[in-house]
Image (cartoon, rainbow, N blue to C red):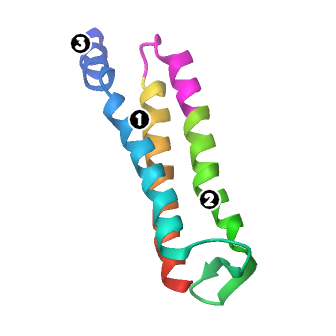
């Protein structure tokens, strides 16, 4: 059992590149909103459903909440990662992969919103 634990720690010990990837995806999301949609005081679609169409309209500046919430979630997961880093289980790696998955989902949501707006 110790051998499996050592291999697991070896694979998940150097995952700082995933944190960098999370930040890069978040920056891409911010810039995609800024360059493609130009959010401002005008009314834009905030939520789009493929079955119903646009569900929420609002100020375009509210679109910046999408990558902002992603950044907050990444920071919360990073603090959780730092607290659990000394443990010899997979929970720190789970925090990294959750943050990375969240950033990918939010980037896809912004890409689809750019097609609507």
Labels 2, 3: front one: 2
Q: Which residue is mark 2?
A: 66
Give the distance between the C-alpha atoms of the residues marked 2 and 1, in whole angstroms.
18 Å
Give the class, few, some or many, for how many residues have Cα within 10 Å of label 3's Cα (few <14, many ≥20): few
Q: Is residue 105 visible?
A: no
Residue 77, percent from left and from top: 56, 33
State which region is magenta. 77-89
- In the structure shown, which secondary structural element does the residue marked by tag 3 occupy? helix
Q: Which residue is mark 3?
A: 3
Alpha carbon of mark 1 to alpha carbon of mark 3: how far?
27 Å
Foreground pick, 89 / 108: 108
Residue behind mark 1:
19
Nearest the eye: 54 or 61:
61
- Mark 2 to mark 3 CA distance (whole Å): 42 Å
Q: Quadrant of residue 79?
A: top right
**Could you tell whether 84 is left or right of 68 in the image?**
left
Residue 72 rendering spot, x and y as whole percentages: 63, 41
């Amino acid at each position: 059992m110790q051998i499996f634990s050592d291999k697991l720690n070896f694979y998940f010990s150097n995952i700082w590149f995933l944190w960098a990837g999370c930040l890069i995806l978040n920056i891409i999301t911010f810039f995609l909103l800024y360059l493609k949609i130009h959010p401002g005081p005008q009314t834009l679609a905030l939520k789009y459903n493929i079955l119903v169409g646009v569900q929420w309209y609002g100020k375009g500046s509210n679109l910046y909440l999408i990558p902002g919430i992603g950044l907050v979630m990444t920071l919360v997961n990073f603090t959780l990662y730092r607290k659990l880093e000394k443990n010899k289980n997979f929970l720190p790696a789970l925090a990294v992969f959750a943050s990375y998955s969240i950033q990918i989902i939010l980037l896809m949501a912004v890409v689809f919103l750019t097609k609507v707006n």
